[in-house]
């Protein structure tokens, strides 16, 4: 089966997030780039499917030319082909993104992709929409947030947990499925995989940006409680103080709990 | 397809109010959680009520429970009271022989028909998996944008809204303007009802906890993010909160494609204590050093009546299963105590524990970012501190 997987390049922010001086973007001078763990799992799932059933994995991203780096990362995991929908760095809304992906899927060859995978939500937007919008544009069913996916012939069975219960969905292919981290454990890229990815040809298309009704005015980092932890001490010597804190929070087993002045 | 009750029946729309153009009221998806209305939905409802003008309706839409047969449920009346407490002027019970299980497209279709009948100006849902999914479908059906993870919204003239919404799972806030004939908004889980919010918000909290018996989380860290946002946002006009809502039943017009995706099986999970609801979480990160190091954390979690949670490094190494992961792409926790051992405190990890009431860090590095998020810290090797703590607890117990 030919599977299309959509991934998005996002900054790999660590302990602290900063916003650029013009307030329009996350400051990426100190960070590398990555794709969301959900999307990496989507690529792994697609590679496993084609290892079982044959076919190919095409990984697609809409973004700056630099996003080719993420396509190569995903090809190193086993995706066969990379497609870059090149943009000028403007932020694309989910509707325009989905439309561009649908157009590209149509252009990429005579065989339409029976299965399109995406992340449940992108790391930066948390929008929860692009997969659903792709599905509507193609008139396909969409399963979201999937943590377990089985394919039997033309039937797709996906499940996820919600409010402590298991939800199972069954639909016929062709379909769109968005997945969450935990559906599998992505492999590490092999050395031959990396070399192949480095040399691989990337197909570049240039879709047309479209506005939607939602306009970003600026980003800011929420004013945190500029608190620093109270240091209880160093090493095992801090344990009595730690015990007092736990006692004060009422989390010690009842046999241990004591009144105000413990220790 | 049975007959429909959709159409201008007069009970729903509160009439157009100044400032919102031709738009009518606000519609909010009220999800069930067992025999109650989900707390996240009650918060979303309070948010929805804050958007409506005094003369506008706030309609809570309730779908049948999984396994329901389209008949009235015994708890409908109770729901009406709870929903009114959180600001609903109208309760709309969706009934359909076809809606016996969760079906996201059908739910979106039903709400789409309601918006037409009510001449609604906004649809609001909690940013849960169901809420986000249903609104994404509604957005795709109508071709309208969906503003996800809002923490505040204000009308800014006809079909125009000023929003603040979370990006990066709450590490960054975006100020945005939405221009749409129908605003589609999901409400971030921790956007409403933090302790720092005003009296109206606490009224909502009171109602939420009284009826659902839920313990409301929220701590300093979380209100650092959201408290300031919600503080100035007259959540409920107290005059209307608690007024008897008008309850009506509607039957949507659904077609085959609306019902293709539906939950076909829904068995209870037989797992023990859940990470999401545990009162104590003992966290372990890369600093634990390997899969064997977790037995001490398990032992401590047992002693404290809690469970173990881990960082992504731990799950991607295969040291522990992903269901134990705390964070942006794992589980969001809201314990009384989160004791984070050998975890640096990356923003994506912290996104999962914004609602922890107290955070204690154990880390060899006094400059690790987690120290800026924690309330208390022990600087040192967890392999020394954790066993010593276990021994001290046991010594006291005997
Ligand atoms: C889009 C995206 C989503 C993500 N989602 C998540 C998520 O859901 N959850 C998540 O956790 N991460 C997530 N991450 C990864 C995150 O950015 C960090 O890489 C990860 O949280 C780091 O894990 P860690 O703290 O265990 O490891 P590290 O960052 O390596 O920190 C280890 C810490 O342990 C301390 N230490 C070392 N040895 C000891 C010792 N003996 N005793 C005490 N302390 C010690 C060190 O000082 C250090 O502070 C995500 C990343 C991205 C880009
Ligand atoms: N620019 C993009 N390029 C490729 N795929 C994308 C892009 N934006 C979003 N997606 C896919 O759609 C998913 C959901 O995105 P969102 O609706 O923004 O949360 C992501 O996890 C990706 O799989």
Image (spheres, helix red, strand yellow):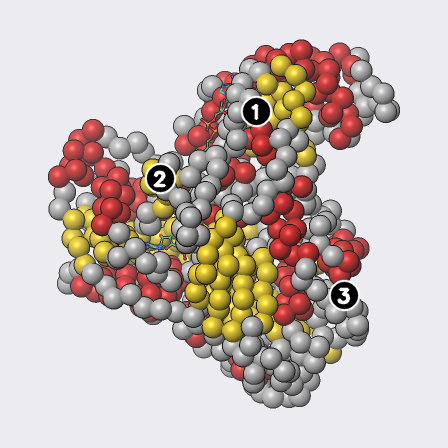
The percent position of residue B240, horizontal first and vertical second, equals 77, 73
Q: Residues within 10 Å of mark 2 (few under 14, many from 20)?
A: few
Q: Is mark 1 within 8 Å of ligand 1?
A: yes
Instruction: Using the image, determine if residue A237 lies above or below residue B140.
Output: above
Q: Which mark is residue B341?
A: 1
Q: Secondary structure at mark 3?
A: helix
Q: Which mark is residue A29?
A: 2
Q: What residue is pinned by disc 3?
A: B85
User: From mark 3 to mark 2, how far is it between C-alphas?
Assistant: 48 Å
Q: Secondary structure at mark 1?
A: strand
Residue occupying image coordinates x 59% and y 61%: B152
User: From mark 2 to mark 1, how far is it between C-alphas?
Assistant: 29 Å
Residue B313 quadrant: top left
Q: Chain of mark 1?
A: B
Instruction: Using the image, determine if residue B94 lies above or below residue B327.
Output: below
Q: Chain of mark 2?
A: A
Residue B260 quadrant: bottom left
Q: How many marks?
A: 3
The percent position of residue B305, horizontal first and vertical second, equals 70, 29
The percent position of residue B269, horizontal first and vertical second, equals 58, 45
Determine whether, in the image, residue A126 is placed left or right of residue B91: left
Instruction: Using the image, determine if residue B354 lies above or below residue B174.
Output: above
Residue B32 quadrant: bottom right
- The quadrant where ligand 2 appears is bottom left
Q: Residues within 10 Å of mark 1 (few under 14, many from 20)?
A: many
Instruction: Using the image, determine if residue A246 lies above or below residue A62.
Output: above
- Residue A150 seen in this snapshot: yes
């Amino acid at each position: 089966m030919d599977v299309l997987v959509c991934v998005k390049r996002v900054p790999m922010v660590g302990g602290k997030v900063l916003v650029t001086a013009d307030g329009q973007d996350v400051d990426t001078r100190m960070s590398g780039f990555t794709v969301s763990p959900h999307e990496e799992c989507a690529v792994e799932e697609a590679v496993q499917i084609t290892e079982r059933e044959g076919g190919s994995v095409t990984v697609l991203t809409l973004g700056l030319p630099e996003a080719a780096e993420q396509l190569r990362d995903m090809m190193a995991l086993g995706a066969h082909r990379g497609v870059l929908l090149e943009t000028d760095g403007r932020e694309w809304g989910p509707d325009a993104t989905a439309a561009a992906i649908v157009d590209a899927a149509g252009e990429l060859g005579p065989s339409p992709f029976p299965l399109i995978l995406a992340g449940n939500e992108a790391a930066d937007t948390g929008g929860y929409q692009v997969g659903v919008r792709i599905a509507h544009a193609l008139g396909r069913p969409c399963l979201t947030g999937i943590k377990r996916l089985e394919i039997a012939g033309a039937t797709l069975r996906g499940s996820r947990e919600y409010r402590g219960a298991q939800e199972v969905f069954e639909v016929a292919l062709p379909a769109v499925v968005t997945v969450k981290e935990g559906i599998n454990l992505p492999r590490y890229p092999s050395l031959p995989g990396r070399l192949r990815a480095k040399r691989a040809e990337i197909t570049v298309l240039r879709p047309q940006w479209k506005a939607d009704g939602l306009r970003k005015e600026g980003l800011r980092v929420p004013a945190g409680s500029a608190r620093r932890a109270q240091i209880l001490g160093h090493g095992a010597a801090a344990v009595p103080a730690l015990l007092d804190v736990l006692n004060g929070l009422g989390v010690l087993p009842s046999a241990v709990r004591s009144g105000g002045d413990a220790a | 397809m049975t007959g429909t009750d959709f159409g201008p029946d007069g009970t729903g729309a509160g009439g157009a109010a100044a400032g919102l153009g031709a738009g009518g009221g606000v519609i909010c998806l009220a999800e069930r959680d067992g025999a109650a209305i989900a707390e996240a939905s009650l918060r979303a409802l309070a948010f929805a009520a804050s958007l409506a003008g005094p003369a506008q309706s706030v309609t809570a839409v309730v779908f049948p429970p999984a396994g329901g047969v389209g008949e009235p449920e015994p708890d409908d009346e109770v729901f009406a009271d709870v929903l009114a407490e959180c600001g609903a002027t109208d309760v709309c019970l969706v009934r359909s022989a076809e809606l016996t299980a969760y079906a996201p497209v059908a739910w979106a279709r039903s709400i789409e028909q309601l918006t037409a009948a009510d001449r609604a100006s906004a649809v609001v849902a909690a940013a849960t998996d169901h809420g986000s999914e249903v609104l994404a479908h509604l957005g795709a059906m109508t071709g309208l944008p969906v503003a996800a993870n809002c923490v505040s919204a204000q009308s800014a003239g006809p079909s125009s809204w000023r929003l603040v919404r979370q990006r990066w799972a709450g590490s960054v806030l975006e100020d945005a303007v939405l221009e749409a004939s129908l605003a589609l908004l999901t409400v971030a889980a921790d956007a409403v009802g933090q302790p720092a919010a005003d009296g109206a918000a606490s009224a909502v909290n009171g109602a939420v906890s009284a009826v659902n018996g839920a313990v409301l989380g929220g701590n300093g860290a979380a209100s650092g993010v959201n408290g300031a946002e919600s503080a100035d946002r007259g959540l409920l006009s107290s005059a209307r909160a608690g007024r008897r809502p008008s309850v009506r039943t509607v039957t949507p017009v659904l077609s085959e494609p609306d019902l293709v995706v539906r939950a076909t099986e829904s068995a209870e999970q037989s797992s023990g204590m859940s990470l999401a609801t545990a009162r104590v979480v003992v966290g372990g990160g890369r600093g634990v050093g390997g899969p064997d190091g977790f037995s001490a954390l398990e032992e401590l979690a047992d002693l404290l009546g809690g469970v173990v949670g881990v960082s992504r490094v731990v799950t991607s190494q295969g040291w522990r299963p992903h269901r134990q992961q705390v964070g942006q792409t794992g589980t969001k926790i809201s314990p009384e105590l989160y004791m984070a051992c050998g975890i640096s405190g990356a923003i994506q990890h912290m996104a999962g524990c914004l609602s922890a009431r107290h955070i204690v860090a154990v880390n060899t590095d006094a400059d690790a970012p987690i120290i800026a998020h924690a309330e208390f810290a022990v600087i040192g090797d967890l392999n020394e501190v954790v066993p010593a703590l276990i021994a001290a607890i046991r010594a006291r117990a005997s």
